[in-house]
Image: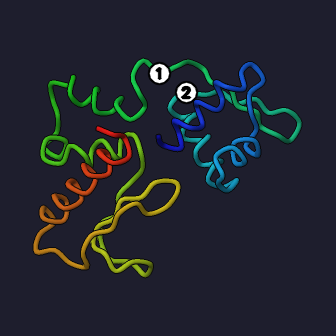
Amino acid sequence: MTQAQRALAYLRSVEPGGATNADLARHLGTSHQTVYMLTQDLLRQGLIRGELQGRTWRFYVLQAPAAPIHAQGVAAAQSSQSATPAETNYPHVARWVQDFGWIEIGQDDYSRSMVRALDIGGMIWEGKASYATLDGALKDLDQALAAWFKAEMRE
């Protein structure tokens, strides 16, 4: 279960009172900064609403999603008649960036890998230091994310 799913489940469990960032951080066992980024993402997705009460934000679930959060992007991509070549060639990468986190490609000062997958909790996978082609790096990433979905989402 992702942090977003755990946060939504917690918010449903405390209805109608809602929860603050501090409440969510305690329940999820994570930092206030991570919860802030998570609630901002859930707000953008239209899954929660926030009310400013004095200097504290309180969040409430708007609705139960029709499909699990992790499946929304895939369902949209599958129902689309115009899937892009990237979505066709790297479906797990597309799903990851649409619903879970982001990827980084290229060298930086913080990692020796050429390609990485991250979410609000940090790096979940990093590839090799170099690849012969960008396609090879993306295929490696797609396979790693397929394994992650299988392990974490029990698919």
Residue 104 in the image: state x and y as whole percent: 35, 63
- Mark 2 residue type: Leu
Badge nearest the viewer, 1 or 2: 1
Mark 2 packing: few (<14 Cα in 10 Å), some, or many (20+)? some
Position of residue 132 relative to residue 79, above or below, is: below
Q: Quadrant of residue 47?
A: top right
Q: Quadrant of residue 55?
A: top right
Residue 95 in the image: state x and y as whole percent: 30, 41
Disc 1 to disc 2: CB gap under 8 Å: yes
Disc 2, SS: loop
Name the residue that disc number 2 marks: 47
56 vs 73, left or right, is right
- Front-most of residues 50 and 100: 100
Q: Looking at the rendering, in which quadrant would you find the C terminus?
A: top left
Name the residue that disc number 1 marks: 65
The residue drawn where x is 27% and y is 69% is 127
